[in-house]
């Protein structure tokens, strides 16, 4: 069975597994205070051109969103996100479970618009009964988005300016950040993200690690006693070394960027092959997630041989599905997929 279901179906890059084995019997302090975590943090600061960055390692994406958002919001505040944003559509109400409403904006191929964001904020503060409402307390985006699309540098700048004007933290979910950074169609760098975002995370789980996300607070704005907040959420990993070793490896000799680039190359190869087969795309994604339109009977026939993700119903006869490449995708498997069309 071929699998293009997601970008975390494999385990971990062999260099990470080798480092975990090499360091396995070292006796190290817990909770992220070991020297591997400190080395990884310093390498990430350099990669972001942000020497003042404060960094904390967490295990998974939903956990990270929950902890970061809850730590930054007051009890009466919610988080603004696209209707299709991960925290709104695919995290089982984790944010609401922590006591914060997700305040949705329209999405444009997964992205939010700075003008629409400002209009929402103007409407809120112009409402004389705003004290009886959920306050917009921060802004959430993901890059890449749920549709594999990317924000431009100008779009990030515009969103950042609105957030500054209204004193809202600007937060980027970077679960697939490596794949966004290595797209040939982006003009955004890690340094740009550190400049425009107040906090973001660098995803490891979907980009070569067994698990792990690196949260980066860029403006010396990590909430006080953040470790304690993390522990309150049950999210503090005693063996923090497991995360430190992995990110130390990912940010040595550009491994994170090299394996992300491989996923993009494989996605481009898949895209070209599917186009030659006459397959129609739902939208143009410049990253590792490709969304195609399949006739329902053809989709069911393909499901017997290939694992992929259902995305949404297009009409009575057609469905949008997603094929995802990863750091570990093999060209031979894409060739086998193309033979089925």
Image (cartoon, rainbow, N blue to C red):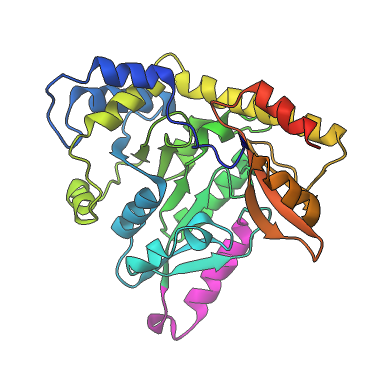
Dominant secondary structure (helix, strand or loop) of the stretch shown in magenta: helix
Foreground: 168 or 8? 8
Name the residue: 25% across, 28% down: 37
Question: In the drawing, does residue 256 fall left or right of residue 325?
Answer: left
Q: Is residue 220 above or below residue 181?
A: below
- Whole-percent x and y of residue 213? 37, 38
Question: In the drawing, does residue 239 fall left or right of residue 79?
Answer: left
Q: In which quarter of the image is residue 17?
A: top left
Name the residue: 51% across, 78% down: 126
Q: Is residue 195 above or below residue 121?
A: above
Q: In which quarter of the image is residue 250?
A: top left
* Magenta highlight range: 112-134
Q: Is 194 contained in the magenta span?
A: no
Quarter of the image with the C terminus is: top right
Question: In the drawing, does residue 315 fall left or right of residue 32?
Answer: right
Name the residue: 59% across, 27% down: 329
- Whole-percent x and y of residue 158? 58, 50
Quarter of the image with the N terminus is: top right
Foreground: 338 or 161? 338
Q: How many marks?
A: 0
Name the residue: 27% across, 22% down: 39
**Residue 251, can we see it?**
no
Q: Is 124 contained in the magenta span?
A: yes
Q: In this view, does 212 lie above or below 312?
A: above
Question: In the drawing, does residue 264 fall left or right of residue 216?
Answer: right
- Whole-percent x and y of residue 304? 68, 45
- Whole-percent x and y of residue 168? 42, 58
Foreground: 308 or 326? 308
**Residue 111, can we see it?**
yes
């Amino acid at each position: 069975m071929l699998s293009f279901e997601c970008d975390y179906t494999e385990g971990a890059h062999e260099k990470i597994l080798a480092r975990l084995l090499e360091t396995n019997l070292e006796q190290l302090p817990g909770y992220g205070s070991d020297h591997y975590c400190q080395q990884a943090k310093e390498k990430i600061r350099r990669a972001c051109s942000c020497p003042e960055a404060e960094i904390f390692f967490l295990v998974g994406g939903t956990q990270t969103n929950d902890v970061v958002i809850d730590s930054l919001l007051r009890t009466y505040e919610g988080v603004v996100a696209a209707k299709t944003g991960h925290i709104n559509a695919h995290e089982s109400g984790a944010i609401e479970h922590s006591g914060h409403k997700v305040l949705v904006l329209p999405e444009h191929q997964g992205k939010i618009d700075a003008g629409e964001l400002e209009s929402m904020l103007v409407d809120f503060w112009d409402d004389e009964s705003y004290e009886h409402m959920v306050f917009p307390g921060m802004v959430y985006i993901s890059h890449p988005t749920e549709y594999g699309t990317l924000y431009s540098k100008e779009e990030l700048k515009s969103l950042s300016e609105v957030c500054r004007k209204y004193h809202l933290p600007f937060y980027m979910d970077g679960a697939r950040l490596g794949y966004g950074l290595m797209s040939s169609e982006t003009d955004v760098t890690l340094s740009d993200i550190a400049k425009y975002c107040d906090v973001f995370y660098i995803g490891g789980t979907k980009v070569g690690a067994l698990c792990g996300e690196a949260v980066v607070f860029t403006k010396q704005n990590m909430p006080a006693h953040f470790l304690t907040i993390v522990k309150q959420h049950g999210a503090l990993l005693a063996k923090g070394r497991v995360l430190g070793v992995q990110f130390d490896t990912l940010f040595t000799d550009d491994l994170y960027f090299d394996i992300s680039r491989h996923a993009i190359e494989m996605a481009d190869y898949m895209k070209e092959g599917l186009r030659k087969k006459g397959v129609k795309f739902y939208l143009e994604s410049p990253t590792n997630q490709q969304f195609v339109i399949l006739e329902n009977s053809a989709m069911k026939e393909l499901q017997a041989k290939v694992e992929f993700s259902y995305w949404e119903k297009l009409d009575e006869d057609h469905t949008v599905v997603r094929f995802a490449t990863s750091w570990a995708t093999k060209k031979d498997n894409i060739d086998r997929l193309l033979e089925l069309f």
